[in-house]
Image (tube, rainbow, N blue to C red):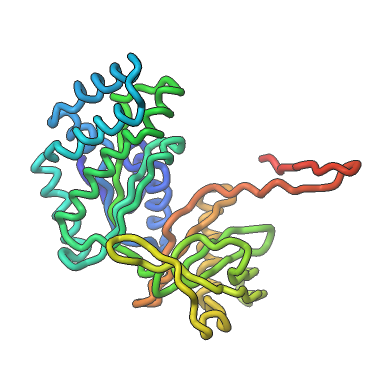
C-alpha cells in the first residue's frame, strides 16, 4: 500500500491524523482538494530498500556519545536525500500526479506526521508543477522526520527513531492567493466565520467576521474588517505579503451563499466527529469554489475574569 486516495475511512497510522480527518469529511460530502497520500508503509519500504536504518542508528549513537544534535540530524537528512526511492513507488507517485492533471498542474506536497506531537516536522512545498518535483518533495518530507527538533523530541520522549514514519499528502492547489481563506467553527447556535483575502488563517484583527445561524432562513451578521494586506504566492515556491486594493479593503470577502455553505460544513463536521471542530477553508480565485483544507478539534480559549484585583484564567472542560 504505497499510495491511497483521499476518501473514506483511512488509517491515521498510515496517512496521519490531519489527513485522515480530511478524508472523512470528503466521504461526508464536504469539498476538499483532490489528492492522495504516500503512506507510512511506503516510507518504511524506502528506509528498508535504501538501507537507511544503519545510517540512522549510527548517527544517533554518535549524538548520544557527544556529537552535536544539529550535525547528527543533518547527517541523517543527507543520507535520505542521497538515497533513491524504490522505482515502484516513484511510478505510483507520478501516476497519482498524472491523475491530478500531470505536468503543469499545480499541487501542494505536505508532510503529514502520524502523531500530533510530530507536527514539529511538518513542512509544505507549494505550487509544484512536474512529476519530478513531486517525487523530490516526497523525499524531502521523508527526510524531515529527522529535523533537529524531531530527533530531539524523540530523544526526550524515549521514542524509537527506527519506528517513526512520515506519510506525505499530495493535493491539488487551491489558488487562495487570488481568492480568500479563513476559518469556520460552531458556537452555540451560530457558526463563526473569519475571512481574509489571500492565504492563511486570519487573526481577529483586520479580518471580516461573520455569525451565521444556519437553517431554512439563515440569519447572517457581518462585520467588515480592514484587510490592509494579504499573503500571495511568490516564486520560487514561497509567499509574500502585499497591500490589498481599495476594492478589497472596502468589500466583504464572502457572499451570503458562501457563508451558508461554510456554516453547513461546520455543522456537519461537528456532527460527524461528535465534538466541536474548527475548519480551515480556502476559496479558489480561478473557479470560485470553496474547499476545506484542514479540520481540527476546537477548544474554547481561556476566559479572563477579575478576581480580587488579579486576572484568573477559566477554561471550559468536556
Vertically, is 140 above or below 242? above
**Is 114 in front, or is 188?**
114
Q: Which residue appears at 25% of the width and 25% of the height?
A: 56
- The quadrant in which the C terminus is found is top right
Outermost residue on the top side: it is: 65
Q: Left or right: where does residue 210 sit relative to residue 109? A: right
Marks counted in the figure total 0
Q: Position of residue 99 (x, y in %)?
A: 19, 61
Image point 23% across, 46% down: which residue? Answer: 138
Residue 16 at x, y percent in the picture: 37, 41
Left or right: 136 as drawn, with respect to 167: left
Q: Quadrant of the N terminus?
A: top left
- Report the residue that reaches farthest toward the right: 308
Percent across and percent down for residue 88 are: 10, 43
Tell me where residue 140 appears, x and y as whole percent: 25, 44
**Residue pictured at 42% horizontal, 74% vertical:** 179
Q: Nearer the viewer, residue 54 or 34?
A: 54
Residue at the bottom extreme, as displayed: 247
Residue 278 in view of the camera: yes
Could one spot residue 214 in this view of the protein? Answer: no
Give residue 188's quadrant in the image: bottom right
Residue 239, located in which quarter of the rendered image?
A: bottom left
Amino acid at each position: 500500500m504505497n499510495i491511497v486516495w483521499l476518501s473514506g475511512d483511512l488509517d491515521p497510522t498510515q496517512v496521519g491524523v490531519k489527513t485522515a480527518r480530511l478524508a472523512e469529511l470528503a466521504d461526508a460530502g464536504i469539498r476538499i482538494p483532490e489528492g492522495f497520500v504516500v503512506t507510512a508503509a511506503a516510507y518504511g519500504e524506502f528506509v528498508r530498500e535504501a538501507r537507511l536504518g544503519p545510517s540512522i542508528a549510527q548517527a544517533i549513537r554518535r549524538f548520544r556519545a557527544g556529537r552535536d544534535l544539529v550535525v547528527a540530524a543533518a547527517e541523517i537528512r543527507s543520507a535520505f536525500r542521497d538515497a533513491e526511492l524504490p522505482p515502484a513507488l516513484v511510478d505510483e507517485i507520478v501516476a497519482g500526479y498524472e491523475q491530478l492533471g500531470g505536468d503543469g498542474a499545480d499541487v501542494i506536497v505536505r508532510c503529514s506526521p502520524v502523531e500530533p506531537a510530530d507536527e514539529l516536522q511538518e513542512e509544505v512545498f507549494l505550487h509544484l508543477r512536474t512529476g519530478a518535483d513531486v517525487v523530490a518533495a516526497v523525499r524531502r518530507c521523508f527526510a524531515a522526520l529527522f529535523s533537529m527538533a524531531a530527533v530531539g523530541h524523540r530523544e526526550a520522549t524515549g521514542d524509537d527513531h527506527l519506528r517513526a514514519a512520515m506519510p506525505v499528502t499530495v493535493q491539488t492547489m487551491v489558488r487562495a492567493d487570488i481568492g480568500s481563506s479563513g476559518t469556520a467553527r460552531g458556537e452555540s447556535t451560530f457558526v463563526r466565520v473569519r475571512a481574509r483575502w489571500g492565504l492563511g488563517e486570519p487573526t481577529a484583527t483586520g479580518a471580516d467576521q461573520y455569525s451565521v445561524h444556519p437553517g431554512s432562513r439563515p440569519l447572517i451578521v457581518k462585520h467588515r474588517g480592514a484587510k490592509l494586506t494579504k499573503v500571495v504566492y511568490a516564486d520560487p515556491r514561497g509567499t509574500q505579503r502585499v497591500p490589498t486594493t481599495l476594492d478589497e479593503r472596502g468589500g466583504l470577502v464572502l457572499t451570503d451563499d458562501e457563508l451558508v455553505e461554510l456554516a453547513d460544513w461546520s455543522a456537519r463536521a461537528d456532527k460527524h466527529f461528535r465534538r466541536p471542530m474548527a475548519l480551515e477553508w480556502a476559496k479558489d480565485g480561478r473557479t470560485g469554489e470553496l474547499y476545506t483544507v484542514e479540520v481540527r478539534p476546537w477548544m474554547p480559549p481561556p476566559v479572563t475574569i477579575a478576581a480580587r484585583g488579579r486576572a484568573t484564567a477559566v477554561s471550559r472542560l468536556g
